[in-house]
Image (spheres, rainbow, N blue to C red):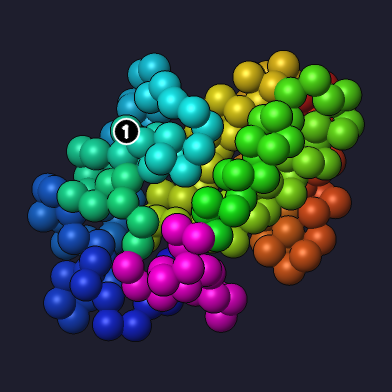
Amino acid sequence: MYDAIDDPYTYENSTVLVNKLGLRKQEDLDDFEAEISSARSAEPLPEGQLDFAHYCAVHHHLFQDVYEWAGKPRTVRISKQGSPFCFPEHIDVQAAKLFLQLKADHFLENLPAAEFAVKAAHFLAELNAIHAFREGNGRSQLSFFAMLAERAGHPLDLERLDPGAMLDAMIASFDGDETELAQIIARLVGA
């Protein structure tokens, strides 16, 4: 659950996000969101230039059936367990910087697997710190990253993904330690 102050994304006097079905119980919304985003992730993802607009299109694709604001950067400040994510007024600038660096790094193509894992961990850590959307960041990050890894010649073996370990690694990377995340990525690409 995210912490947000004066959150226009939620129903009045509630922490449940306003959604297209009008679901008012968090459990019902969680179930619907998981089912729909999973179904959408099985469809072909939007094509694009692996830039921020493309990333937003992936989020829209996954959550278009759930939220009106799918694919649009958030407008409120949020934090998780007391750790604030990028302030909304800086999302566009920080995302532009991150994706410009990704392009300058040739989308991590032609790198040995171990080097790819280290650079990819840094990219994911930064993308997570930006946390562009009010909800659905993790699923969007993973879907986008899978496309990036495929293009870079290091397809992910998602059968090997341990969601709990990945979450712990993402938290550690938020605190500045990308080692565990790089190790997880290395395992996913068979390094």
> Can residue 167 be seen here?
no
> Dot 1: within a 10 Å radius of its alpha carbon, few (fewer than 14), some, or many (20 or more) residues?
many
From the viewer's perspective, tell me whether residue 52 is left or right of residue 105: left
Residue occupying image coordinates x 82% and y 41% = 118
Query: Is residue 72 shown in magenta?
Result: no
Residue 162 drawn at (x, y percent): 68, 39
Residue 39, relative to residue 139: is it above or below? above
Residue 18, relative to residue 55: is it above or below? below
Residue 3 drawn at (x, y percent): 42, 76
The number of callouts visible is 1
Which region of the structure is painted magenta? 75-93
Residue 160, relative to residue 140: is it above or below? above
Q: Amino acid at mark 1?
A: His
Q: Kindly indicate the quadrant of the structure image that contains residue 17.
A: bottom left
> Can residue 99 be seen here?
yes
Residue at disc 1, secondary structure: helix
Residue occupying image coordinates x 60% and y 44% = 100
Residue 59, relative to residue 173: is it above or below? above
From the viewer's perspective, tell me whether residue 61 is left or right of residue 185: left
Q: Kindly indicate the quadrant of the structure image that contains residue 149.
A: top right
Q: Which quadrant is home to the C terminus?
A: top right
From the viewer's perspective, tell me whether residue 42 is left or right of residue 163: left
Residue occupying image coordinates x 45% and y 58% = 92
Residue 161 drawn at (x, y percent): 67, 33
Query: Is residue 84 shown in magenta?
Result: yes
Can you identify the residue that label 1 sits on?
Answer: 61
